[in-house]
Image: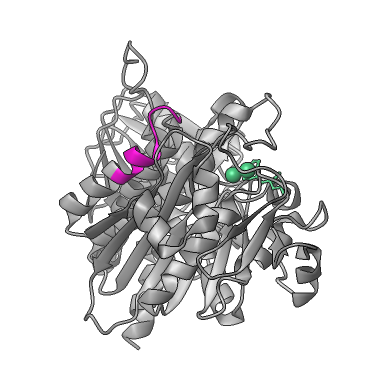
Amino acid sequence: MEFSIKSHSPEKAKTACAVVGVYEGKGLAPAAQALDLAAGGAIAALIKRGDLDGKAGSTLMLHQPAGLACERLLLVGLGSESQVSDKAFRDAVRAALKSVMASAATEATLWLDEIPVGDRGGDWKAEQIVLAAAELAYRFDRLKSEKPVPATALRKLVLSVERARVRAAEAGLARGRAIAAGVDLAKDLGNLPGNHCTPSHLADQAKDLAKGHGLKLQVLERKDMEKLGMGSLLSVAKGSDEPPKFIILRYQGAAKAHKPVVLVGKGITFDSGGISIKPAAEMDEMKYDMAGAASVLGTLRAVAELKLPINVVGLVPTCENMPSGRANKPGDIVTSMSGQTIEVLNTDAEGRLILCDALTYAERFEPAAVIDVATLTGACVIALGHVVSGLLANDDDLAHEVYRAGEAAGDRCWQLPLLDDYQEQLKSNFADMANIGGRAAGTITASAFLSRFAKKYKWAHLDIAGTAWKSGKDKGSTGRPVPLLVHFLAGRVKQAAG
Ligand code: BES
Ligand code: MN
Ligand code: ZN
């Protein structure tokens, strides 16, 4: 999709589809008012008759409206005029684009920058429009032998913006495009099944990313990990015939002395559960167990495209979790890179076993902050559903910063308490700790486990088990939390600038 910005009035614009806002309770947004005037009051009359209620996300498409220059006019409901929320704006944009995409219009012009949305700027609105368009245009059909016909004739979106606000809108377009590219990469990797998306494939993707965007890449092989003493990660990998990889991608946008943010992504390319094997139903969805890794790669892509003046390191420990004669067995005790020993009471709690060694490895970068991203616990889906990601942290300021980034990005998360009291559930009779803490508070005990390896820096953990993909009819990867992470990193730039 092509995006551009123009400053022009709606009554004169020769567009295939003009999109303007209407409030609940019959109020017209300024562009709709201007069109109504040009059309001799036809729009107000139509709304008065009750053909559009103005609820956020309602739409009405008019063809060849008399007296107007546009071929089509799409009225889109914005909800209450006194307060257009983030969600109402997003719902309206999504519904409008859906309706335009279902028409034969190849181009559309949106007068939506004029809608006040709390204290969100024009950059935010432009970004949301780009992200919604990318979301609706996304298809994953590379493994279908017959390529379906394109979903839409729409090729071009024009954002009409007042002259004084063009710069803000341009910044939003750029951020939206970069985030959308990162989200698309994360979605593609997530949707690609385990027989295609192996640890080696993730390493190849990291290589392409490094080449295309000037990132530094290092990939550790099994023997390198052995030398480093990553016994916990390797214990998960040894049940599979696929060789494990440890991907290190470095983006340098600031001076070397500038401490990096380290992102760590869980890269289990298929989670069968291992010897503690999972039930058969929906086990296919465990191809998404590398969504954390995918989001780290997607975020690095976006950050590189935006050329953010910061330093970022992406760490991706990646392997399969399979049952075999060489697999971890319940009761096995492994030694992590940190020297701490772990009793593997359940081989299906493998995410924390690979992440803990990556968290120890992260120490060498003297990070400003570390954020790990993982489809870590089914318990998180029970606690928070598919709306917000779980957030836990050893530093409240960092937690708040991550939370705010999620709000701004429309990719929200919610904090759970990482209290010392939960550590007791990880007691082992035979090792320094067990890898599970029982059924109660499963998301918290998983991060309590991780926190034992994140003592030397500020650290936050995002559990994306409920948000990284959708089940059912719309089964597929969501690309979350790339938008959150990009906003977090972009926010750090502003901080550094004072
Ligand atoms: N990858 C799963 C978590 C998961 C489960 C994500 C369902 C999305 C949907 C993880 O490796 C896992 O199996 N966790 C176990 C931990 C338990 C054994 C303590 C779980 O959540 O059941
Ligand atoms: Mn598992
Ligand atoms: Zn897993």
State the quadrant of the C terminus.
bottom left
* Viewer-side residue, 480 vs 358: 358
Q: Please tell me which residue is depicted at 33% across the width and 40% down the height of the picture.
A: 200
- Residue furthest toward the top? 146
Q: Which residues are magenta?
A: 194-203
Tell me residue 496's x, y (percent): 34, 84
In depth, the one of 45 and 472 nearer the eye is: 472
> What is the x, y in percent for residue 441?
78, 58
* Above or below for 217 versus 48: below
Assess whether residue 226 is covered by the magenta stretch.
no
Residue 33: in sight, yes or no?
no
Q: Is residue 454 visible?
A: yes
- Say if 143 sits above or below 146 in the image: below
* Residue drawn at 44 percent across, 47 percent down: 318
Colour convention of the picture: one colour
Give 261 or 59, whichever is nearer the viewer: 261
Q: Quadrant of residue 452?
A: bottom right
Task: Tell me where residue 27 appears, x and y as whole percent.
Answer: 55, 51
Q: Nearer the viewer, residue 295 or 330?
A: 330
Total labels drawn: 0
Q: Residue furthest bottom?
A: 498
Image-based side of 351 in relation to 291, left or right: right
State which quarter of the image contains the N terminus.
Answer: top left
Q: Is residue 65 above or below residue 408?
A: above
**Hey, which quadrant is residue 161 in on the image?**
bottom left
Residue drawn at point x = 57 percent, y = 78 percent: 455
**Measured from the top left, where is residue 293 in percent x and y?**
43, 50
Please state the quadrant of the image where ligand 1 appears: top right
